[in-house]
Each structure stands twice: as C-alpha cells, then as structure tokens.
Image (spheres, helix red, strand yellow):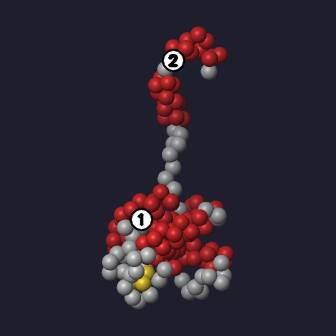
Amino acid sequence: FTRHLGDAAMMVTSAQIKEWEIFILENLGWNLSTVTPIHCLEFYEGKGVVYVDDSWNGRALIEKIPRYIKKYNDFFANLCLQDYFYTQFSPSHLAASILYASRYALSLAPVWRPELEAMTGHSQEEVFEVFTHIWKFYADTFPSHARKSA
C-alpha cells in the first residue's frame, strides 16, 4: 500500500481506506454478505415454528418439541450441505423444506401450516417438492433410521 502512495500513506485514515474499499466493491458489483438456509432457519425458529394446536404422534405436544425441531433443522441443514444439488434452491425455499422435513421426522401434525406458508413465503406444494429430495437423501444415507414413506 505504501509503495503506491509513498509518504502520503501516512496521512490516509482507516475511514478513507474503508470508503475506498466500499467504492471498489460497489463498482465491481461484489456482495460480501450471503444469506444461507441456516440464517433463514434461525429467523423462522425465532418467530416460532411449533404451534399450541400442533399434535405430536396424535397427542398433545411435550415441552421438548421446540428444542427437537432446532436439532432436526440443524441436522437436515448439515445433510443438505453435503450435496451440491441443494444449491439450486433459494435459501428461504431450502430452509422451509428443511423445516418441513423436521416437522415430518418428528411426526408433527399438520406438517405444514398456513402460518408457516405466510412466514416463509412458500406453499406446501413448493416445500414438498424439495422435501422429497431431502427425505430421499436422508433415507439413502441413513437407511435404518428413515421412515420409508414420505
């Protein structure tokens, strides 16, 4: 840096350097922030993805279910990171599909709700399409753990 500015480098402030960096990034069209499915999942979880009138295996919910949803979301998100196939979906779409997989794996009913569609912006049909790929990948990877029907 100093070889380009010589003695003038001593008069450059960190604020000026930051301003130049932003100018260059904007002119090159670079975006250094990326939203990932995990960011979306954290947002959804923060808003709430388990509802008082959900049922678990046909019974009332137990207090551990929200914690389990988080663990399953993390598991399915990490599973999806292992296959390039999932990069074709938007982060919010993939996150909604992961949430569907988590609710399905935990036998929550209904698996998809109008509130989830409103929050995620994705219909059950959109989410189910990606869910089927996630569930097949899960079943192929962990054949003794996955329920056969999806």
Residue 71 visible in the snapshot: yes
Determine the residue located farthest toward the front in the rendered image: 63
For marks 1 and 2 on the same chain, the one whose residue lies earlier in the sequence: 2
Please give the residue where the numbered disc 2 appears in the rendered image: 12
- Residue 45, labelled with which disc? 1
> Residue 46: x and y, percent?
39, 62
How many residues crowd around disc 1 within 10 Å: few (fewer than 14), some, or many (20 or more)? some
Q: Quadrant of residue 148?
A: bottom right
Residue at 56% across / 69% down in the picture? 76
- Tell me the distance, in whole angstroms, between the alpha carbons under discs 1 and 2: 45 Å
Q: Which amino acid does label 2 sit on?
A: Val
> Residue 8: x and y, percent?
55, 12
Q: What residue type is labelled 1?
A: Glu
Image vertical order of residue 113 relative to residue 80, above or below: below
Q: Quadrant of the N terminus?
A: top right
Left-right relation of 86 to 16? right
> Residue 66: x and y, percent?
42, 72
How many labels, in total? 2
> Residue 30: x and y, percent?
53, 40
Local SS, label 1: helix
Image vertical order of residue 150 relative to residue 8, above or below: below
Residue at 51% across / 42% down in the picture? 31
